[in-house]
Image (cartoon, grey):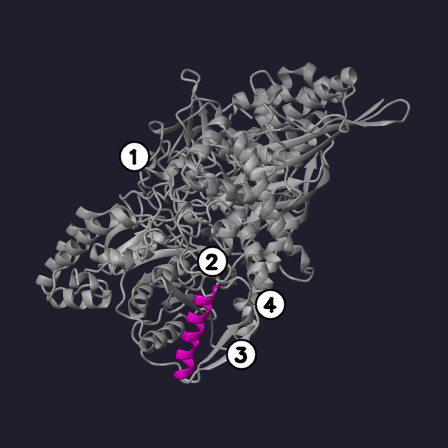
Amino acid sequence: MDVKLIIGMEVHVELDTASKMFCACSTSFAAPPNSNVCPVCMGMPGTLPTMNALAYEYSVRAGIALNCTIARYTKWDRKNYYYPDLPKNYQISQYDLPLAENGSFEYELDGETKRVRIIRAHLEEDAGKLLHEELTGYTQVDLNRAGTPLLEIVTEPDFRSADEVGAFARELRNTIRYLAVSHCDMQKGQMRFEPNINLHITADDGKVYKTPICEVKNLNSFRAVEGAITYESRRQLAEWETSGVTMATGNKVNRGWDDKKGHTVPQREKEEAHDYRYLPDPDLIPVELSDERLEEIRGSIGEMPIDRRRRFKAELGLNAKDAAALVEDKHLADYFEAAAAKSKLPEPTAKWVLNEVTAHCNEHDVRVADFPITPHRLAALVILAESGEISRAQGREIFTEMLTSEKDPVEIQQAKGFGQITDESALESVIETILAANPKAVEAVKAGKHQAIGPMIGHVKKQEPNANPKLVREMLLRRIQGM
Amino acid sequence: MAISQDEVRKVAKLARLELTDEQVHRFANQLGAMLDYVDRLKELDVEDVEPMAHAISLRNVFRPDAARESQGVEATLANSPASDPPYFKVPRVLRG
Amino acid sequence: MRDAITELSAAAIRAKVAEGELSAKAVVETHLAMIEATNPRVNGLLTVCGEESLAAAERIDARVANGKKVGPLAGVPVAVKDNLCTAGVRTTCASKILENFIPPYNATVVEKLMKADAIIVGKANLDEFAMGSSTENSAFGVTANPWDLSRVPGGSSGGSAAAVAARMAPISLGSDTGGSIRLPASFCGTVGMKPTYGRVSRYGLVAYGSSLDQIGPMARNVADAALLLKVISGRDELDSTSVDRPVPAYEKSLDKPVTGLKIGVPVEFFGEGLDAEVESAIRRGLEVYKAAGAKIVDVHLPHTEYAVACYYIVAVAEASSNLARYDGMHYGHRTSETGDLVETFRRTRAEGFGEEVQRRIMLGTYALSSGYYDAYYKRALRVRRMITSDFEAAFKQVHAIAGPVCPTPAFKLGEKMTDPLTMYLSDIYTISVNLAGLPAISIPAGYSKSGLPIGMQLIGPVFSEGKLLRIARMHESSAGLADRRPAVVDGK
């Protein structure tokens, strides 16, 4: 028996516009319930939607990044269904002419490049929020979110594992952030995932059984997406083994995710089969996109994270881990690039950025953009540290001072009297003393055990803290080998 | 008659209307008569005709992305049949 | 004459008020008195804004007294169809589901009226959600035709037409989705114009068929209709479908006749079912133009017989979606019976909507539902294009098209209520105009032997309102129809 896991993804991304998609209410997340609401987004009689230009442009940007064909003519449709978080009881969406379709998107998993086909991306409005009041048995409605622009991205069922989906989802989040069309803050529901999962089971007799597709709704974290897929693959196999249910005999099901228990739970099926009765929205005007405008938007899109990672590796010689860590945050990567360009020392610059700069930002809750040391000053520090004149600890001390001072690193070094001894003659007597005191280690090194030299370097440093360890090592080796 | 009572009930459910049996009967007849009348549209060859959803051929009508002060919770809830300020209060919605 | 003030035109009232010859307060008081006298019998207004209108009149009088400028409708009482939102004033759409709905916003046309210093004296009755041709579908009682109280005023803007005919206001606003301004104008002997789609903002007009709906003026003469149209027209940033195009001073060049005028008479409008009295009134109207030197030619609108069918798919499909929002969740009526969510939705809507509204929602839902979309809705949209092309071809030959508004004069209350289809066919000559988005006007063309008004319809190409009004004025100035008025005005 062979079991193949098949997954397609639907991803919703809330676009980072100041106002809602069809009215001028704010999209601010922090507002008190029902305070960002007006007659338009609460669907009052006679009100009409007006299209947010930026929401459209953002969607086109995303469509380009997903390598989609961007529609030159697109329109808005009404998707009709009744729900108390949807004030008009229809959602303004796009049906037969989405603004982007037939794309593809690359991501990396364990060093391998993978590709998923994108069916479409379209723009629609988000719904409000329902809060289930356990005590009274009523439901509360907050319409602040109603009308927030939402980009829906639909992939082909090209994924074969939870890891693939996880890698895709992370790459997509980074890409959307690079496009600056959404913060993709998942805790705020700005990026939500709905995997469609089923199994293709090849029995020993060669017959193929396909389990009913399960759509897991509204997943708010990478962990939840991966967990839900892993859980579903086991659940569906077990269900098939006991009941034999397949796509042909069972319906598509919707399930929710219980984050605490770590499993999917059945959702109450709506009473009727979905019949959304789409129709063109007569209140909204179609959009035509000219060649010039499309090229203008295309030109405004910078390098995407996957390309940047590749460049950092190929051109700057970074390892995969450092490249990924830097590129994940566009501001951090920008900072790094500026510093590395100045220092001409990409690898050590990467270490300094990833260790010291990120540590400071995280600890003090500072954005990279507000980090006090400019990339050029950091580059000067990297050059100084790499020259071997100062120790690592001294470098860090200079860094700390630079956070609050405008002085350049060499000035600080001089003021503090930091400087490693790089003059051999100044070290010769200490070296001799240590060699004499450690005959066993000397013998070991002679016998080829080079690691035995470490403790001796330590002893030298204890007596002469400013000694350059590289130089000490060199001198010790030379002396032992000459014995 | 072009529409059955079962179909009327199905459509009523989709339209969120609760019909009496008598209404179902009446609507089945009346909607049937309307559909019979509307069937004349099938006489026309519409193959090469572009559907016309709008009476005007405007394109690209946008609003700049600028947020404005909203109306405030009180005005939002003023017409609501039931509220639990600052929320609207609606019958229990089962998840799903 | 019962009261000279209520006989004044809007233009005359404005002139007298602006000159200080007549106080806005006196204008409002006499009209409120007329409303008090006639409305109980006509039921043209659902809400009378007594206090608000007196207060507004006093503000205008104070400005006149201080020598300040006043707007183009200063002191003019206006009745506004009750599907137009008025901030702080109940807006019901003649539906139980919005019985207590008080909008926190004004429709754009209402804003424009206020800016022009017009005074809204009341909210006019209509067929519930503007769905009907007789104003019998109102949840708050039928409106009677002021010319014969046993007859319908036409619909759906029956209250707006009746209010003007019965001198409750010199002008009013209606809305027209398939003939809802022109039909009641014809039945009540008033002028009523449906502008080009996009000429007037729909913001705040409670939607019925959004791609067809248009707000328009109703008046007792062409000049007042032109004046009111000028005030309400123009692009509105709140309505994406409103067109950015200059608004001419329609009221200024009215008496300039159209030279070399060519009027088309659609052969298809004079077929079976057209009442003989209506036909002869229209023929007499055409004679007036001939006498003025116009050329009258036959034109063809070959898809006329499909217009009603096309409309009753397109309009109801849009309506089924537009009216989905009335569910008792965020505003409006909610059933007092307890139940789960779906039961609450269904009961609320069953209690809140009248039979005709439910019927149209059902038909629209059916036409959009899976398996029927292509056969009904999509096909109707294609036929709509064919109907529009008919007009485009005709307007290559003529300046305007003239014909009847309705096959018959006003019919009896209750006469057509049992058979929806027969009622729908009242709109056979008006509906295609909405499908094509064209401007059209109904003007009084004569009276039946029993004294019922008969209207004539003039249809023009898009944005030809100015020319249409001039053509209408040509008829008005030479047909000699003035000086008749309904008996109810004189308390009879």
Mark 2 crowd level (few <14, some 14–19, many ≥20, 10 Å Cα): some
> What's the distance in space between the residues labelled 1 and 3, CA to CA?
58 Å
Secondary structure under tag 2 reads loop
Q: Which residue is mark 3?
A: C397
Q: Which residue is mark 2?
A: B61
> What's the distance in space between the residues labelled 3 and 4, CA to CA?
15 Å
> What's the distance in space between the residues labelled 1 and 2, CA to CA?
32 Å
Secondary structure under tag 4 reads loop
Instruction: Name the chain letter of the residue that bears numbered label 3.
Output: C
Secondary structure under tag 3 reads loop
Kind of residue at disc 4: Pro
Secondary structure under tag 1 reads helix
Q: Quadrant of residue A202?
A: top right
Q: Nearer the viewer, mark 4 or mark 2?
A: 4
Q: Which residue is mark 4?
A: C302
> Does residue A48 appear in the picture of this structure?
no
Labels 1 and 2 within one chain: yes
- The residue positioned 61% from the left and 43% from the top of the image is B32
Residue C137 on the magenta segment: no
Q: Nearer the viewer, mark 1 or mark 3?
A: 3
Kind of residue at disc 2: Val
Segment colored magenta: C275-292
Labels 4 and 2 within one chain: no
Instruction: Name the chain letter of the residue that bears numbered label 2.
Output: B
